[in-house]
């Protein structure tokens, strides 16, 4: 069974990628700081799109009681996410540090729009840690209980 990432999450990730790519093209200290963020963030986004986001596509059917035996395949994904959670959070810390530097450089150079984007990315990261990752793991735990696997 294929687990489709909710469209809103895909769109948000794509928008964040575009905004960061735009900042890297500015050049100078801001562009260098943005490139540092992008180097750390890109491989992390790939992991999220592989492990953290697909289980969330099951939230809507599960909330309606629509549980199918083939959904148990998501357990491999959610178990992997659960195991790599400390690494994901550690990567977040490195990304946040780089984003703080980007925000500081942008503020010093009076480019507040870039500082705002950096702060928006930090909020996105906190949302992942507080809501998205736990929700993805809960999808697996809920299915494990319901399907008795």
Image (cartoon, grey):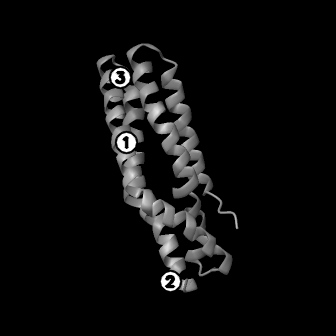
Q: Quadrant of residue 113?
A: top left
- Is label 3 or label 2 in front? 2
The answer to whether 32 appears left or right of 147 in the picture is: left
Q: What mark, if any, has residue 122 been given in the picture?
A: 1
Of residue 86 and residue 108, the one placed in the foreground of this image is 86
In the rendered image, residue 37, in percent from the top left (x then y), is placed at: 43, 31
Label 3 – label 1 distance at C-alpha: 15 Å
Q: Which residue is mark 3?
A: 106
| Residue 59 in sight in this render | no
Residue under the image location 37 percent in, 42 percent down: 122
Relative vertical location of residue 21 with respect to residue 6 in this rendering, above or below: above
In the rendered image, residue 88, in percent from the top left (x then y), is placed at: 41, 50
| Residue 10 in sight in this render | yes
Number of residue marks: 3
Label 3 – label 2 distance at C-alpha: 48 Å
Q: Quadrant of the C terminus?
A: bottom right
In the rendered image, residue 101, in percent from the top left (x then y), is placed at: 32, 28
Residue under the image location 32 percent in, 35 percent down: 97
**Which secondary structure, mark 1?**
helix
**Which secondary structure, mark 3?**
helix
In the rendered image, residue 136, in percent from the top left (x then y), is placed at: 49, 64
Q: Are marks 3 and 1 in contact (CB under 8 Å)?
A: no
The mark that comes first in sequence, 3 or 2, is 3
Q: Which residue is mark 2?
A: 145
Q: Quadrant of residue 83?
A: bottom left
């Amino acid at each position: 069974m294929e687990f489709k990432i909710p469209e809103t999450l895909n769109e948000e990730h794509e928008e964040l990628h575009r905004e960061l790519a735009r900042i890297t093209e500015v050049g100078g200290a801001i562009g260098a700081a943005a490139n540092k963020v992008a180097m750390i963030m890109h491989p992390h986004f790939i992991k999220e799109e592989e492990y953290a986001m697909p289980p969330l596509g099951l939230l809507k059917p599960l909330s309606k009681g629509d549980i199918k035996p083939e959904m148990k395949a998501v357990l491999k994904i959610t178990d992997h996410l659960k195991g790599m959670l400390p690494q994901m959070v550690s990567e977040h810390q490195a990304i946040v540090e780089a984003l703080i530097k980007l925000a500081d450089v942008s503020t010093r150079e009076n480019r507040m729009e870039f500082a705002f984007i950096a702060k928006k990315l930090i909020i996105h990261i906190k949302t992942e840690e507080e809501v998205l990752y736990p929700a993805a793991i809960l999808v697996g735990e809920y299915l494990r209980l319901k399907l008795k696997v």
